Amino acid sequence: MKTTTLLAALTLGVADLVQGHYIFQQFGVGSTKFSVYQHIRKNTNQNSPVTSLSSPDLRCNVGGNSGASTTVASIKAGDAFTFRTDQAVYHQGPISLYMSKAPGSVQDYDGSGDWFKIYDWGPSFSGGNPTWPLRSDYTYNIPKCIANGEYLLRIQSLAIHNPGSTPQWYVSCAQVNVTGGGNANPSPTVKIPGAFKASDPGYTANIYNNFKSYTVPGPSVFSC
């Protein structure tokens, strides 16, 4: 009986490990919903988070620094795009969107260049209680003024649900070719890794103790 109980517990634990996290694995442009990992660089760590602030995996996830086998989605500047998860995001923390222009083909780009942030979903506060943007799809628009060309379009979920432990990063990158854009030079720009520090208030926040406000880590949001 004890052996059966132990095996059942171990089986449940493995299932929790497999199903317990989420990954941004599906991309869409406008009303078009692409297949899983179509135009998105496929990670090789299943759905485990990145936890090192100094790792290049922070750009596009483990296995995501090469895009040679990933197709490129065409999208007009100003048009909407959507990232979808395999299951709804449920770890508290902000969701952010970044872009980085490839020097040539985005399929050959490792993301080591400059990144700029285009949007943050942070918590809203009502009556002193925070509400986080926890769901399975996140939609925004390509900035109208950025230059034409191929970009990495990156989404990150920073999970800060366990104060005192290392925060977790859930990240994915889509490959896009922007058309119909302008000539803006987005700023500020950052390098990833390097954009986030262990001392950032939004990285170290305790969301269960006197949590009244929140600043999302990283640079300010670029706007046309």
Image: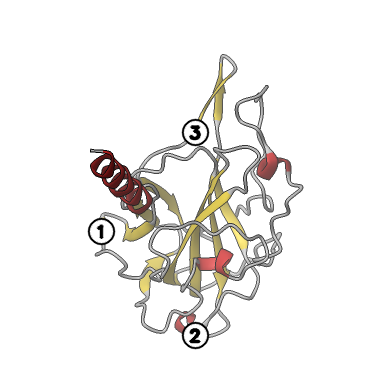
Q: Which mark is residue 33?
A: 1
Sequence-earlier tag: 2 or 3: 2
Look at label 2 and name its amino acid. Asp
Left or right: residue 54 compared with residue 17: right
The number of numbered badges drawn on the structure is 3
Contact between marks 3 and 1 (CB within 8 A): the answer is no
Q: Which mark is residue 108?
A: 2
Q: Mark 2 packing: few (<14 Cα in 10 Å), some, or many (20+)?
A: some
With respect to residue 5, does 24 lie above or below?
below
Q: Which residue is mark 3?
A: 132
Sequence-earlier tag: 2 or 1: 1
Between 175 and 68, the residue placed more toward the observer is: 68
Q: Mark 1 packing: few (<14 Cα in 10 Å), some, or many (20+)?
A: some
Q: Quadrant of the N terminus?
A: top left
The Cα–Cα distance between marks 2 and 1, rounded to whole angstroms, is 25 Å
Residue at the location (46% across, 74% down)?
Answer: 63
Indicate the position of residue 210 as horizontal and vertical percent values: 68, 22
Q: Nearer the viewer, mark 3 or mark 1?
A: 3
Indicate the position of residue 24 as horizontal and vertical percent values: 39, 56
Look at label 3 and name its amino acid. Trp
Residue 58 falls in which quadrant of the image? bottom right
